[in-house]
């Protein structure tokens, strides 16, 4: 068991090195334009460019550059320096983290609370009207781009520009500590829009997984034991059906923690996703590079956690 | 088979049908049999004979498959088909228990074996977890699982095939059922393990005075365990007799085919095995009249028009057969075949 | 990928095993069975027809636009504004209104099918090709090849595609990438979409190959002396056509959404070429007053993606019916 964990963690580290190496190639080697120039922002003076050159060590051989880059990354968690903003990318990210966490956690709670039960009920009442309706609605939600939904929802319900002024509009986010109520209401619409798409996916997944599970032999055995149907469904069926959902959940949360770029942009929430977006629109390479690395980190960690969790959840895995 | 004692189980004209996209499947087409307490009935047939569906129907497990069921299943005088789901649930795993073919897939992979057995006990008995666990360890010992105190906390994939089936049996016996239905209990096991499991079943049956219905395609199993045998074909019982009689004086051509297609040590090497010609019939478009007539070497043209009914064999109490040939003719044919 | 990863739960094809139906009514090829079931699914048929129409529209966009009496998608007309200088909304001559440059929105929505379908279908096709080859190789040869390829798949999946895509798009925007070969626009998008999707197909195919490998018909073929290549391509691959079809159809809507998202961020299809995602982005600053050129492209996007999802579901149900309730 411990060996398994160690192996997974080691692989995770290798993965991170590989991803960062890829980023290095992508952002320093691949572009035809001069890397220093790219990072210098708008109409930089030659002095600034020269400074950046020396900071990045662009005069040194490529391998040295790469070594320094990796060393900084793993030892100091140095994700680069944004010359435009005059701050290290790391500090920028930490500033934005609470907003992204708020958004992610709230949405996750919501989509699990809706998606899983809907999926279970749909699986149990297949082909009923409830099933058709919820699966139809899920399919529509899955097919709609979230940012578009966000815009529609703002258009309809936002306090400043909406037709029916119910919720605070975009850009009204404040930190939890400064004004809890405002924090909560400003996140309601983003939570709903973000959770809608995911709830739809999870409902569909849960339904498919449960249908598959309920046709297994051990369900027949459970019924033959004389257990109540409720117990059969929940403790035998759902218990087995929910494990694949775990993997996906961890990955989704991991990705979102790296910034729900689309939602944060539309609702103007100062999270990591927004940081990425601003970085892109301003061509701020260090920020783009840093945020991509961060998300990769979250995904890799999520993967490792899931693999480990699986070993706890499914006893068959432990012994392979 | 018919004594003065009240039969524990009496199935009367059971019919089970399923609607599928290809048509209406007549899985069980009017079967009738009885079982006394403490006796063993073997139900033999090929795939598609309806034997498994009839067994599942006794447990009420075909209800949620969208089957239309008619007839009566009398257990201790109560018609199980007339019972509501909750009443049926109280009987399942309690008075009537069932074990299945593949013990690995029949046990839940994510729960410990002991916990699954404890669940079976507590489903019907108001005992604490601790008491149930004691009972479970006792049961595991009863079915011959070594070191039950340790094994009780292991997972199904940690057991061997034979042990898993023993655990399934233990689970079925958890509440002292009066009737045990075993659906192909040894088919998925190695031959040596098969013998052990059958021996176990026989011993337990004796100790617990349990009635057993054993459903199988394997005549060897039936010869070993059954007091009485019912041979099923295309959803109907074509012959029913005490085991000894069935093997010595079979009356139905299908039974002859089954018996003659088994290799035995008595045959000489040169003698070829004689399989039954043709294929099992479709349960949607069954042959008219006698369902077996297309494959029967002795069929007459009118056998395609008349349904044979299960009738007593003259001179042999407890032996019934559904065949349109004359008893004397059948007797003569069988004598010819076995000399 | 963002919401809507294709459900990767393989179907076990549970059937009425209990019944063991015996001799069948009439032998039908798997394809006939599939087609019959598919035909009976009204929704799936409707989606197939709708997609067929979309493809026709995409090909014949200029014709369609002309038939409807609309100006071309890139015809700018700064005069089409109201008193305040905002573009005009839906009217008879411009059923979907005009955008801030005076371009007819309906016309652009129609032309947008080209970008969406090209990227969606072509990108997925490339991804499927790569994914099948990688998955087949990894699953069949196992051992070191499998480990190496699976690690590669893990690596690509660890990279957040949206961000990466945007990053690549941005990086290549200034003066192109790879010494100027990869330029922004359609090619980059197809490249990114293929890059994002192939690992999913590879994983699925690998899993299927691993289980098929153990089946008797492969052993039989091998014992007849078939070479590895022959077994791979003649025995195993044909058994995979159904899941490959289903999953690639389900991947197309993801590809379309990805293209739209990338265009929304300005790193996808550039104006003046019409792309629904980019149209929504352009509409964002003024959508509270000029709602039409945010809503209509979005509906087109929703409808197209929905149709593909429905088709994928229909294919899945037809190929893998679950009869036992």
Image (cartoon, coloured by chain):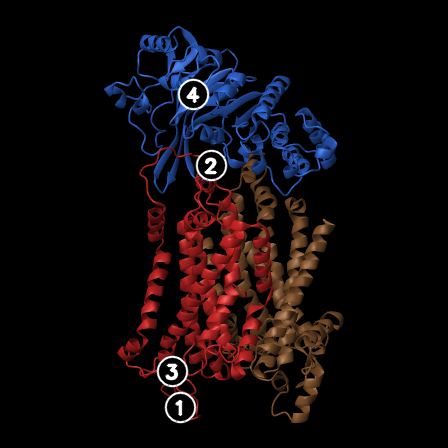
Chain colours: A brown, B blue, C red
Q: Are marks 4 and 1 in contact (CB under 8 Å)?
A: no
Residue receiving disc 3: C97
Q: x%, y% of residue A278?
A: 60, 81
Question: Mark 4 packing: few (<14 Cα in 10 Å), some, or many (20+)?
Answer: many
The residue depicted at 41 percent of the width and 75 percent of the height is C296
Structural distance between the alpha carbons of marks 4 and 2:
24 Å
Q: Is disc 3 placed on a helix, strand or loop?
A: loop
Name the disc covering residue C81, or none.
1
The chain letter for the residue carrying disc 1 is C
Residue receiving disc 2: B63
The chain letter for the residue carrying disc 4 is B
Name which of mark 1 and mark 3 comes first in the sequence: 1
Residue B69's place in the image compared with C270, above or below, is: above
A240 lies left or right of A139: right
Q: Is disc 2 placed on a helix, strand or loop?
A: helix
Structural distance between the alpha carbons of marks 2 and 1:
68 Å
Residue receiving disc 4: B231
Q: Are marks 4 and 3 in contact (CB under 8 Å)?
A: no
The residue depicted at 68 percent of the width and 73 percent of the height is A97
Q: Are marks 2 and 1 in contact (CB under 8 Å)?
A: no
Structural distance between the alpha carbons of marks 1 and 3:
10 Å
């Amino acid at each position: 068991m411990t060996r398994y964990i160690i192996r997974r963690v080691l692989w995770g580290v290798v993965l991170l090195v590989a991803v960062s190496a890829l980023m290095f190639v992508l952002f320093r080697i691949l572009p035809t334009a001069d890397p220093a120039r790219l990072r210098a922002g708008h109409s930089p003076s030659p002095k600034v460019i020269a400074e950046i050159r020396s900071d990045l060590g662009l005069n040194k051989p490529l391998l040295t550059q790469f070594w320094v880059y990796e060393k900084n990354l793993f030892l100091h968690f140095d994700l680069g320096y944004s010359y435009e903003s005059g701050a290290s990318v790391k500090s920028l990210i930490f500033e934005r983290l609470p907003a992204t966490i708020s958004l992610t956690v709230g949405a996750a709670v919501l989509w699990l609370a809706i998606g899983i039960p809907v999926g279970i009920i749909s699986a149990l009442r297949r082909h009923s009207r409830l099933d058709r309706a919820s699966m139809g609605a899920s399919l529509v939600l899955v097919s709609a781009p979230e940012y578009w939904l966000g815009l529609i929802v703002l258009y309809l319900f936002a306090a400043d520009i909406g037709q029916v002024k119910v919720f605070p509009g975009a850009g009204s986010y404040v930190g939890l500590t400064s004004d809890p109520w405002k924090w909560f209401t400003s996140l309601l619409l983003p939570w709903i829009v973000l959770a809608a798409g995911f709830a739809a996916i999870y409902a569909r997944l849960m339904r498919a997984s449960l249908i598959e599970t309920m046709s297994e032999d051990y369900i027949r055995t459970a019924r033959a034991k004389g257990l109540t149907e409720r117990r059969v469904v929940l403790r035998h069926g759902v218990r087995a059906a929910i494990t694949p959902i775990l993997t996906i959940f961890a990955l989704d949360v991991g990705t979102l923690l790296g910034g729900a770029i689309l939602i944060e942009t539309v609702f103007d929430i100062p999270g990591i996703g927004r940081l990425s977006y601003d970085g892109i629109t301003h061509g701020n390479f260090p920020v783009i590079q840093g945020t991509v690395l961060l998300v990769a980190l979250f995904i890799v960690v999520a993967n490792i956690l899931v693999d480990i969790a699986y070993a706890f959840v499914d006893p068959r895995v432990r012994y392979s | 088979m018919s004594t003065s004692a009240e039969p524990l189980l009496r199935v009367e004209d059971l019919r089970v049908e399923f609607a599928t996209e290809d048509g209406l499947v007549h899985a069980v087409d009017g079967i009738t049999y009885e079982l006394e307490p403490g006796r063993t009935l073997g139900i033999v047939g090929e795939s598609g004979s309806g034997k498994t569906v009839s067994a599942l129907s006794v447990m009420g497990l075909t209800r949620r498959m969208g089957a239309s069921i008619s007839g009566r299943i009398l257990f201790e005088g109560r018609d199980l088909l007339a019972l509501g789901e909750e009443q049926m649930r109280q009987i399942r795993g309690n008075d009537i228990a069932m074990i299945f073919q593949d013990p690995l897939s029949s046990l839940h992979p994510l729960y410990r074996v002991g916990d699954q057995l404890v669940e079976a006990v507590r489903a019907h008995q108001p005992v604490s977890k601790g008491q149930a666990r004691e009972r479970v360890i006792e049961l595991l010992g009863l079915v011959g699982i070594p070191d039950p105190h340790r094994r009780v906390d292991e997972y199904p994939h940690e057991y061997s095939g034979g042990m898993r089936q023993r655990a399934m049996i233990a689970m079925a016996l958890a509440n002292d059922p009066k009737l045990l239905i075993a659906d192909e209990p040894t088919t998925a096991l190695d031959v040596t393990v098969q013998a052990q499991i059958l021996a176990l079943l026989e011993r337990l049956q004796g100790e617990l005075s349990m009635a057993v219905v054993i459903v199988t395609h394997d005549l060897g199993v039936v010869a070993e365990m059954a007091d009485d045998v019912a041979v099923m074909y295309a959803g109907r019982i074509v012959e029913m007799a005490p085991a000894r009689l069935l093997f010595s004086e079979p009356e139905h051509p299908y039974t002859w085919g089954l018996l003659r297609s088994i290799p035995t040590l008595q045959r000489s090497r040169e003698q070829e095995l004689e399989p039954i010609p043709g294929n099992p019939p479709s349960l949607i478009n069954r042959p008219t009249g006698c369902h077996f007539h297309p494959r029967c070497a002795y069929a007459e043209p009118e056998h395609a028009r008349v349904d044979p009914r299960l009738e007593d064999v003259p001179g042999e109490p407890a032996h019934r057969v559904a065949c349109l040939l004359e008893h004397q003719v059948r007797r003569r044919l069988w004598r010819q075949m076995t000399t | 990928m963002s919401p809507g990863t294709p459900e990767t739960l393989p179907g076990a094809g549970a059937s009425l095993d209990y019944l063991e139906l015996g001799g069948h009514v009439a032998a039908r090829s798997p394809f006939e069975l599939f087609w019959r079931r598919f035909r009976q699914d009204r929704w799936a048929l409707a989606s197939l027809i709708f997609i067929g129409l979309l493809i026709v529209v995409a090909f014949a966009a200029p014709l369609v636009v002309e038939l409807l009496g609309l100006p071309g998608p890139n015809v700018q007309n700064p005069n089409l504004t109201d008193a305040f200088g905002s573009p005009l909304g839906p009217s008879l001559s411009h059923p979907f209104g005009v955008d801030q440059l005076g371009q007819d929105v309906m016309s652009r929505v129609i032309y947008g099918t080209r970008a969406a379908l090209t990227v969606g279908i072509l990108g997925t096709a490339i991804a499927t090709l790569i994914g099948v080859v990688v998955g087949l190789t990894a699953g069949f040869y196992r051992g070191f090849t499998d480990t190496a390829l699976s690690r590669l798949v893990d690596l690509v999946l660890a990279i957040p595609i949206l961000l990466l895509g945007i990053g690549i798009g941005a990086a290549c925007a200034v003066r192109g990438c790879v010494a100027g070969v990869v330029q922004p626009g359609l090619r980059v998008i197809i490249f990114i979409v293929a890059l994002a999707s192939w690992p999913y197909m590879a994983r699925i195919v690998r899993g299927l190959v691993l289980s098929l490998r153990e089946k008797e018909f492969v052993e039989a073929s091998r014992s007849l002396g078939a070479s590895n290549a022959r077994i791979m391509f003649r025995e195993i691959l044909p058994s995979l056509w159904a899941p490959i079809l289903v999953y690639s159809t389900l991947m197309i809507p993801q590809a379309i959404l990805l293209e739209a998202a990338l265009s929304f961020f300005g790193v996808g299809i550039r104006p003046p070429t019409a792309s629904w995602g980019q149209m929504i982005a352009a509409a964002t600053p003024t959508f509270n007053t000029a709602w039409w050129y945010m809503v209509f492209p979005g509906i087109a996007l929703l409808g197209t993606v929905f149709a593909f999802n429905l088709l994928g579901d229909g294919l899945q149900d037809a190929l893998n019916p679950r009869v036992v309730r």
